[in-house]
Image (tube, helix red, strand yellow):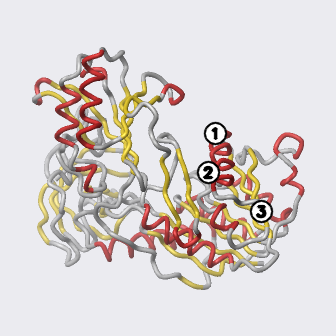
Amino acid sequence: MARRRRNRKQLDLTPREINIESMAHDGRGVGRGEDGKVVFVDYALPGERVKFVPVMNRKSYLFGSTIEVLESSEHRIEPKCAVFGECGGCVLQHLDEKIQIQYKQQHLLENFKKIGNVQPDELLPPMTGPHWGYRRRARLGAKFVPKKGGMIVGFRERNTSYIQPTDKCEVLYPEVSAMFPDLRETLEKTSCNDKIPQIEISVADNAVVMIVRHLEAFIQSDLDLLTEFAKRNEVQMFLQPGNLKSVHPLYPEKPDALFYDFKEFDIRIEFLPTDFIQVNGGINDQLVSKAIELLDIQAGDKVLDLFCGVGNFTLPLARKSSNVIGVEGDQALVNRAIHNKELNKLDNVDFHFGDLFKEDMTSSSHGDWLEQKFDKILLDPPRSGAAEMIKRIPEFGASKVVYVSCGPATLARDAGVMVNEHGYKMTHVGVIDMFPHTAHVESIAVFEK
């Protein structure tokens, strides 16, 4: 089970027993202690009785970590990962995959009720895919710790900043996971092994990329070691000595452009190693198809895609619609989206920069799209939601809005505005299993006038 939190002060560490009644949004089991205080317990499931040790005490609640399961849930399964309970990357491997998605759906619906005061007319079937080897993006921590045998590479532990060493990750693409031992040994041999804090990984359809962050300049022998690693494992190796603008290729000197394809739409999306792309490629394919289906594009429809990134939804939409406009708040991503438009030889789509977290945008500084009308709108905001853009939705006159969300609470908040203030009806809602074995909840909602 999870390692106990360090540096606790004035905390009674006596093990206690508790009945778990429900599950919190972060995957912790929830029960009440003998004193009536709410207790959140790592790696405990509803219906179980567990023995736990406290790890943090607050006035109205207590955090604990399971040390023994006294009465087990029928849905508890054996975790696949050897370091589950230590590594903070996954928190639900002990729960049957089918039940994981049910809890996520339940959490989403509770948010709609409590935060937005809305309920959907219809639930879509959960969107699911492979539960293992699905992750194509990751940020690994690294640290040289002589007392632990040298270089440590892995994800952060839950509740701490410490790195959990691992030689294998069950949710990463298998070819990436297999590189862990070689990566650790290579980094340990460098002259500045204590100045390497992280490695970022991206998997494209055509290549695997690693970005090594280093706080001290590599000497030539270090560069040779990293180059040989890249050759052995057939990866593109990039270095990051400073901020994101400092990222540059080591091997090959002129790497091929990274891309992923949407075969259904005959679309290719090119991206840089530092660009955001969806973690789960298989689910992303399903999601884009489903979003376009739900928008129900008709001949002559004009579509607005807000938070469009590199064109993940916009370009497939352009295959279905007569005219699409994509808006993004990161100029570098806008430039990449324009490149992808040209790559796919599309002339019915335009991209604009716009700070979508400002309600008071003006067309003079953000483009004339602000003054236009649209038949359909797609939103795919970050976890903080789309509060400012939701306020402006009525101005665009859209009959249908599809909202893709990675934050249940902010989606519920925005849904409340759409339904209770703007007069839309929330016709469909579905949960998306973008991150199996984690507590992250991705979802999609449809609003119609």
122 left or right of 4?
Answer: right
Say which residue label 2 marks: 309
Residue visible at 64% across and 39% down?
A: 332
- As helix, strand or loop, the secondary structure at mark 3 comes to loop
* Picture layout, residue 169 above or below residue 256: below
The CA span between labels 1 and 2 is 9 Å
Residue 56 can be seen in this image = no
Say which residue label 3 marks: 348
> Which of 79 and 222 lies nearest the eye of the viewer?
222
Say which residue label 1 marks: 332
The CA span between labels 1 and 3 is 21 Å
Q: Residues within 10 Å of mark 1 (few under 14, many from 20)?
A: few
When asked about the image quadrant of residue 376, the answer is bottom right
Of callouts 2 and 3, which one flags the residue occurring earlier in the amino acid sequence? Answer: 2
The percent coordinates of residue 300 (x first, y second) are: 82, 75
When asked about the image quadrant of residue 104, the answer is bottom left
The percent coordinates of residue 217 (x first, y second) are: 36, 15
Q: Residues within 10 Å of mark 2 (few under 14, many from 20)?
A: many
Of callouts 1 and 2, which one flags the residue occurring earlier in the amino acid sequence? Answer: 2
Q: Residue type at mark 2?
A: Gly
339 left or right of 47?
Answer: right
* Picture layout, residue 107 above or below residue 329: below
- As helix, strand or loop, the secondary structure at mark 1 comes to helix
Q: Residue type at mark 3?
A: Asn
* Picture layout, residue 142 above or below residue 50: above
272 left or right of 94?
Answer: right
Q: Residue type at mark 1?
A: Ala
